[in-house]
Amino acid sequence: MIDRPTALIGLDWGTSNCRAFRLSLDGAVLETRVAAQGILAVTNGDFAGAFSRLVGDWLDAHEMAPVLMSGMIGSRQGWVEAPYMRLPAGAAEIAASLVSIPLGGRAMRVAPGLVGPALSGGEDVMRGEETQILGAMDLVHMSDGVLCLPGTHSKWVELRNGRIVRFATFMTGEVYAVLRAHSILGRLMGEDAHDPDAFTAGLARATAAGGLLHQLFAVRTEGLFERIAPSGLAAFLSGLLVGHEIRAARAAMPGARIVLVGTAALTGRYAAALRADGVSAVEIAGEDAAARGLWRLADEARLGRV
Amino acid sequence: MIDRPTALIGLDWGTSNCRAFRLSLDGAVLETRVAAQGILAVTNGDFAGAFSRLVGDWLDAHEMAPVLMSGMIGSRQGWVEAPYMRLPAGAAEIAASLVSIPLGGRAMRVAPGLVGPALSGGEDVMRGEETQILGAMDLVHMSDGVLCLPGTHSKWVELRNGRIVRFATFMTGEVYAVLRAHSILGRLMGEDAHDPDAFTAGLARATAAGGLLHQLFAVRTEGLFERIAPSGLAAFLSGLLVGHEIRAARAAMPGARIVLVGTAALTGRYAAALRADGVSAVEIAGEDAAARGLWRLADEARLGRV
């Protein structure tokens, strides 16, 4: 089997992980590598060293291939700061705002994050998701509508005419993780097995009276009175939080179809919740979206072309 | 100065602390002691030893004085379990449900917790607060209306004809503490200085669009864009959470006057928030309410009387 030429080395380099893709001229992923080498794990600011350890052999083997990175690597704590750019932003605007990293004679760029008005007032920001969004748009041929990227900080995104015109962050995943690990709610919980019934019970509870800070206490009392088994309490908490996120996000960004981008475990939960509300959902793997977005941006910027 | 006779030794014995009161026949507090000896700090179930270390000299000096305890000491993890009793409950009902601890020939009792329907469905519980509520009712001569006991797990309580007929728990204090200590929101925060302007900004943000999980991210972005100084971010988070609690609680339990029971720092913040909404607030120290509630229950149960 003859390998197709490598047209781009793309990196989705976040806080906790770095995922590297070797991509062909038409955007096919030729090879993928993942390292638990997020920017927080890079000591003494030696990003060049971490970069070389992860993809040094690719660089040697493909001397002409340009490099494009997205994610927290472009933050103030990263390798080179690529300042947040203001909405609206599509592939053309983002490609025009790539920032160079000087390293040998190779074309090497970092994508900027985005800044826009928060639903609640003030500013909202994203970094890394903009690239996954561009990739998802390309994968499903979408230029208008709503996407959701569930995760530690879920992003809901509104597209118009191929550009991101609005987005909102929800701290759902992080609130789930800290409550599970550090609050009284984690005490009665068993393993983090997925329990669809308990998740659905959590979604339903999110529509009850009392608001989130009251409803959270139900994770304790449902356990205390043995109405939900210990193995279901984490899924119940997840359903409660996801229910609140979806309701608040859809109040701002309705839509009969939502494109979900992320890990299968998460997009599956969100898809189930949306379908229960009569909303259709399309699921895209976050990894695929990142690879395609990096390729799309490099193509738009004509990186490595004459 | 001649000491008045000790008619009751009362203990508010919670998860983290134990507060002991020596009380006169008319309910005056003759002496108070506090120890960081909550039930979680008692090893090998040696509650008798912990009890003796804290008030052994009182027991020796006042051989006829009965002992009454409230709080987590009556939970399944405590000394003797005093099962949750069901609403409605006033002093008479709670006094009739005291549970005995056998220790020498002395009258020694533990107060039960309360259970009632949660606003969100299922059950809600309290343990220890019922005694503070009875005390507060006595201190302000109140038999109808709404009380709020802000804290780790805030309780809102509705009284009718001298009995607790409904209550709701809000995890405000615990959510604040875990987000501050363990989430990204704590990273930019300075000292926990009280900043009334930032607290008010948080209260205002709680009424904006996007819901709590979205609004929480503003604690990060307001810090990131230097719209709120690091020293104000904790108060901003507090205002955001307290605003959500008060709005949800008042939707279920409106009232033109709220009696607040707790530490001065907390009741002061809640009073400011309520007054901004045109609601009057009366503040009672939690310690005073606990002492008075223990005395009220002992009196109702005729503890130590012939």
Image (cartoon, coloured by chain):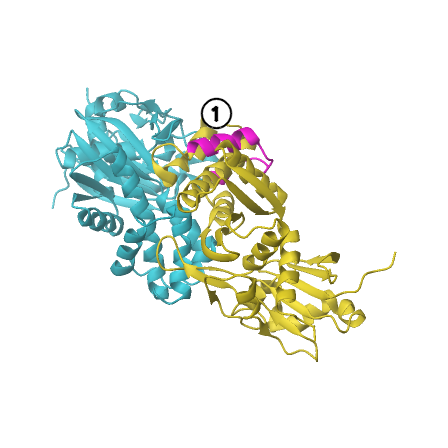
Chain colours: A cyan, B yellow
Q: Is residue B6 above or below residue A305?
A: below
Q: Is residue B200 magenta?
A: yes
Judge left or right: residue A214 versus residue B233. Answer: left
Name the chain letter of the residue that bears numbered label 1. Answer: B
Identify the residue shown where x is 69% and y is 61%: B20
Name the outermost residue toward the right.
B1
Image location of residue B203, percent across then percent down: 47, 34
Which one is nearer the viewer's eye here, A190 or A262? A190
Left or right, B237 with reference to A27: right
Bounds of the magenta span?
Answer: B185-205
* Location of residue B122 in the rendering, given as x and y in whole percent from the top left corner: 36, 60
Q: Is residue B282 above or below residue A265?
A: above
Depth check, front residue: B210 or B273:
B273
A54 in the magenta segment: no
Q: Is residue B183 visible?
A: yes
Question: Can you give x and y, in whole percent of width and height, for residue B176 in the image?
Answer: 49, 44
Disc 1 element: loop
User: Quick one: label 1, few (<14), some, or many (20+) residues within 10 Å?
Assistant: few
**Nearer to the camera, B241 or A191:** B241
The number of callouts visible is 1
A175 horizontally vs A146: left or right: right
On the question of residue A43 being in view, the answer is no
Please give the name of the residue rendered at 22% of the width and 42% of the height, measured from the top-left corner: A260
Taking depth in this image into account, of A31 and B195 the one nearest to the observer is B195
Q: Is residue B117 above or below residue A66?
A: below
Position of A304 with respect to B96 (left or right) is left
Q: Quadrant of the C terminus of chain A?
A: top left
Residue B243, percent across and down?
46, 38
Quarter of the view holding residue B70:
bottom right
Residue at label 1? B227
Which amino acid type is marked by label 1? Arg
